[in-house]
Amino acid sequence: METKFGYMGRILWVDLTLGKFRDEEIPDEVYEQFLSGYGLASKVIYENQPKGIDYKNEESIISVMSGILTNTEATFNGRWMLAGKSPLTGCWGDANCGGDFGPSIKKTGYDGIFITGKSDKPVYIYIDDDDQLILPAEDLWSYQDAVETEKILIKKHGEDSKVICIGSAGENCSLISGVVNNSGRLAARSGLGALFGVKQLKAICLNATRDVYVHDKEKVLASTRKLNTDLNKSQDPFCNTMKWSGTAGTTADSVDIGDTPIKNWAGVAEDDFPHDKATKISGYSITKYQDKEYYCAGCTFGCGGICSLKTNPILKETHRPEYEILAGFGAQLLCDNAEAIFEINEKLNRAGFDAISVATTVNWAFEAYEKGLLKEKYPYLELKWGDHQAVIELVDDIIANKNLGAFLKDGVKKAAEYFDKEGITAPMHVHGQELPMHDSRRDGALGLGVGYEVEPTPGRHTATNAQWQQMATESLDNLVQDNEKLNIKFQRRYVTNNQSHEEQGVDLMAASCSEDIINGAGLCNFSFMGPFVPIVSWLNNVTGWDKTFEEYLEIGKRIKTVRHAFNIREGIDTANVKVPSRAKGNHTLIDGPNAYSANVLKWDDAKSDYYMAMGWDADTAKPLPETLKELGLDFVYKDLY
């Protein structure tokens, strides 16, 4: 059998209805067209999942993917991904996660696992070097949270076993449920835990040992050693913050500069949650509870932390909350109680909820209460901004699927449709997916905001890569600052009267499509935190390819276009996927760094620029026939034309 470099050349199909496993070989040229990760998943799912089916249908597919660089000598390579049709939005759905599970996928000899069908009783999948099994999980279903499930399966199958699983959120098919790994790292977004739940798949446990072969290991190692040295020497403020406190250390700064929305995007930090409060849920206020650093698989940096709060029995060992949690349950709700946020974080991790979605939904509930929508039905409730105990009680009800929580456990869109038929509140979601804690009204955040609308998985802050230009060069000393130096086919496909619009479109396109490269490679976004990351060199030396950045960007564009076309095929009017007007600045703030935001005036032009740079129709967002042909996407062309 021909040796494959970087990828395994196979995927595994699991049919839970029939209880059968099936191998499928993937041709080398497919990896050169789509990489691995959700790139490979996009082609496989597009071609194999019937058009228009509901996520509850037996033919729906959920995939669990590694990346091209997973299990190689490149660092930051430990991400694993879920992909499938989102139960939450009906769009293409994917979710990205760290932890320790990513390498175990490729150790089974496969680049990804694709699961179809439904079991008639709770089960889990177990794979080692000798066996592929579907085993009963009745003793885990409804009885064990995600953290305990992982412990039980590792004890049963050996310390080298790696596990992903759902908690009660996934079991109840919550539309904002994720899949949990390593006692609290979640592939959380897109509600893909509900796909596990509807299939009655509690967990996947892997314990195999197959190797990944690398074309030029020494060159990969040399690049990695240099990056690690540069990271250790870096004086970049963000890099240094990440070293000692991870994203938790960014909270106060994010609040101060207007990156963190306040009071469901209607407040102003300097008035409602000033710096002295923000510091109580940022930096040392969080790391003082840390016992040890936490490293995801394939990472030498270690931006996570394992903490202990002795006063709370469920927090004897817990992951340090990330920025999104501290902002969503802290700054947004005007809560400065760090220990309460630790408790909320642990409870949501164990239940397997997307904490971003829960926080945004809870923020809406506080606004709805303030405007009188909930008082009559729930007279016992007192949802007052800043009351951390009220937040804990509401989160407990969401997890228990009771009282008001039963109406919030499927996210803010469903809750607002039920309680606010007059539209007096602002449910902060895009096509059903709750917005994260990054304000698109902030100066310099236009690309982020446009990404909330145009990305195939809407409402995501991790869908674009603002540091894309770093990928386009050999070193930071040689950094491409001028878009004119990029390959002409990415700039000049469309002639516009305004050069700045053309440049903006290229920048938006490259930031978007470079993220598809990162996910296809299996890299962490935090690798791009300062020092030069040799992703092109890594990919070439791992696989034996000899591609330029422009060629990888075209791969990213191909992946993006398939994911986008999936949404069009599913009947979604992609051009009219919109963020709430409040996130554009139509709810004008008169104080703070985001006062009188001008982004709202630039939004539609920026979207058109992006569509044209992608080779999509500027009005309908439909990929043009010539674009599909140039990208070799005949299987998409026959659906759209």
Image (cartoon, grey):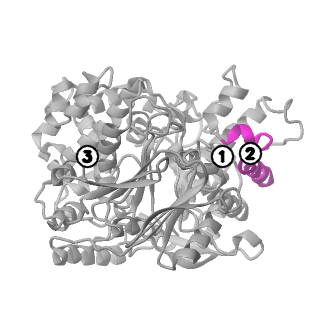
Q: In the rendering, at what x and y percent does residue 325 appear?
A: 60, 55
Q: Hey, what amino acid is under mark 3?
A: Gly
Going 32% across and 25% down the picture, which residue do you hit?
621
| Residue designated by label 1 | 172
Q: Secondary structure at mark 2?
A: loop
- Residue type highlighted by circle 2: Asn
Q: Are dots 1 and 2 in contact, CB under 8 Å?
A: yes
- Mark 3 or mark 1: which comes first in sequence? 1
- Which residue sits at x=19%, y=25%? 625
Please rate how many residues cluster around mark 1, counting C-alpha atoms within 10 Å: few if below 14, some from 14 to 19, many from 20. some
Badge nearest the viewer, 1 or 2: 1
Front one among 362 and 508: 362
Q: Which residue is mark 3?
A: 556
Q: CA distance from mark 3 to mark 1?
A: 35 Å
Upstream in sequence: badge 3 or badge 2: 2
Residue 351 left/right relative to 91: right
* Residue range (magenta): 386-409
How far, Cα to Cα, is label 3 from label 2? 40 Å
Q: Residue at x 33, y 21 (%)?
A: 620
Helix, strand or loop at disc 1? loop
Position of residue 539 relative to residue 83, above or below, is below
Dot 2 crowding, Cα within 10 Å, few <14, some 14–19, many 20+: some
Residue 341 falls in which quadrant of the image?
bottom right
Of 573 and 15, which appears nearest the observer?
15
Task: Return the mark for residue 401.
Answer: 2
Instruction: State the predominant SS element of the stretch in magenta.
Output: helix
